[in-house]
Amino acid sequence: MTAEPGFEAARSSRRALWALLAAMAAWSGCFIARSSFVVSGRRVFCLFEDAMISMTYARSLVEGHGLNWARAGPPVEGFTHPLWVALMVPINALPLDLRFRSLPVQLLSLGILVLHVVLVRRVTRRFFAAAAAPPHWLPAALLTAFYYPLSYWSLMGLESGLQALLTTASVLLALDIVCRGQDRHRALLLLGAAAYLLRMDMALMVLVVQLYVIAGGGLREPRQRASWLQGAAAFAVLAAGYSVFRWVTFGDLLPNTYYLKLYRIPLAVRLLRGSRCLWESLADHLPLLALTGVGVGVLLRHHPDREWRRRLLLPAALVLVAFAYSVFVGGDAYEMPLNVRANRFTAFVMPQVFILFNALINEASSRMSRLAGRRLAAAAAVLGLVSADGLWLAADAAGNRRDLALARPPWTTAGQAPVYAAIARLRDEIAPGSLVATDCAGIPAYFSDFRMVDELGYSDRHIARLPPALPLGPGNYQVFQPGHVKWDEAYVLARRPAAIVRCVAAGRFGDARRLRESGYRYDAGGLVLLGPGPADRPSGLLPRARARPSG
């Protein structure tokens, strides 16, 4: 008995999906392995610096210190992703050494990325396949699965993968409402609440989606209006509930990092740097973006099917809003040093570009034979992947050579291992609970039991509200690095830290004479400044203490 052609096509499509997901999991597993490092014969799994700050908050909560990065004084909200920190809490409750706890976060991110590829395939097949031709979904799914910036930020422990998942899921539900007349308002607004709790600036995504739904006639029927009101009420309760929690716990209306990165920073400086960073990112994706932009523009203007045109608007609007927001905040702190090719504010929305690109392929293949359409989809997927730098990145800071991403560990790993080693040495020099200042707030805080001082202000209310330590204006906007332009060395030294760990902003603070006069000396590793000797050691500091956290 011969199987039906439709059944065979569906089975072939599922096999292709499983093969893609298996290849993606293998690639990601290699990435995770290469992101770890060995210090003193011990394997350490470590996330990106900002993710390790969040891990510190989660560990502090599990160990009874509350949501307090410093483990001293009133808590400060030095993270911007409450929902992501909440997901880290049970991971830090696992009976694992500290050096292994980052691995479950990376595996969680991998699971989210896999689920996101499945969702991208569903959106593409359901809403962006031409009616007269078999639906091609592989270009969008392949580009998403191997898009290096999204993989990098996600597998290094940041919330970017979950942002992408919530965004694509919101697109799916919004199109179900507008194009299919389904009542998905409650689910859509609950997704919006999760996105808002993940990051406050995801409110822009929620706003764009809701405007699209309302303008598209998603509230015509009384039952739709009723469910929308129920969803909106749930969103308001959850958002307001966390705002009350923030005020009661941290005494602030906004996360501390918003004050650090936006407060008293000239708007012109942010716009100039943000525009430059966005242009560099767009240039790295230019062939794909140009083709997609022109193609979508032509379809919006000339396609005879009004509903088809309307479907294109939502992904396009989300992309443009994310780009504009990246410009507004001045880009990311790690644009040029990492050279990942898309920052954290834009990488999560790039799958919407891939969906639009796939829509163009489906529209073109509908005018071809089936074989020609398949060849077009395959060729476009490969060319799009190369254009988007999915598997490629600049191997060095100068951008002189390009290697496959698997050819070397993530760029940050080379800098993380020495910091971890320095903290291991420092734990042999001073007692647990000693006060330690640092401009590298992730690894030193997480892999120690010290009380901490944040020299760059991520978790310090005083520094976050200062003006930039260096004058900033349109003439020197290039020196602006969000989150790395405020410090107060006199304020830090007045607290008499037993040691200072400097690695992120070495050389940006005051002159070395003040440190020498205060009794600080660099250790042999060059990252740690030890405080005064035993004779005048600050109160509570014990020499050569051996107690240390596991890992």
Image: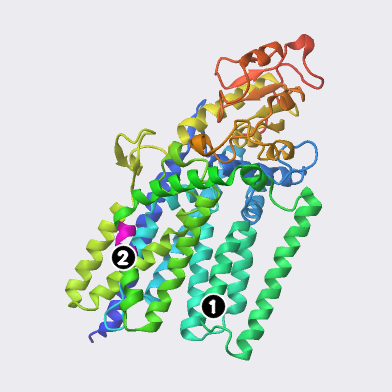
Question: Could you give the CA–CA distance between mark 2 and mark 1, rounded to whole angstroms?
Answer: 25 Å
**In the image, residue 164 above or below residue 131:** above
User: Which region shows up in magenta?
Assistant: 288-293
Q: Give the camera-side residue of 341 and 324.
A: 324
Name the disc covering residue 294, or none: 2
Residue 493's quadrant in the figure?
top right
Amino acid type at mark 1 = Val
Magenta highlight on residue 158: no
Instruction: Answer with left or right where residue 432 lies relative to residue 320.
Output: right
Q: Residues within 10 Å of mark 1 (few under 14, many from 20)?
A: many
Q: How was the colour assigned to the protein in this rendering? A: rainbow
Residue 25, image x and y in percent? 40, 54
Instruction: Answer with left or right where residue 183 lies relative to residue 448.
Output: left
- Residue at 44%, 38% in the rendered image: 336
Residue 37, image x and y in percent? 48, 34
- Residue at 57%, 88% in the rendered image: 220
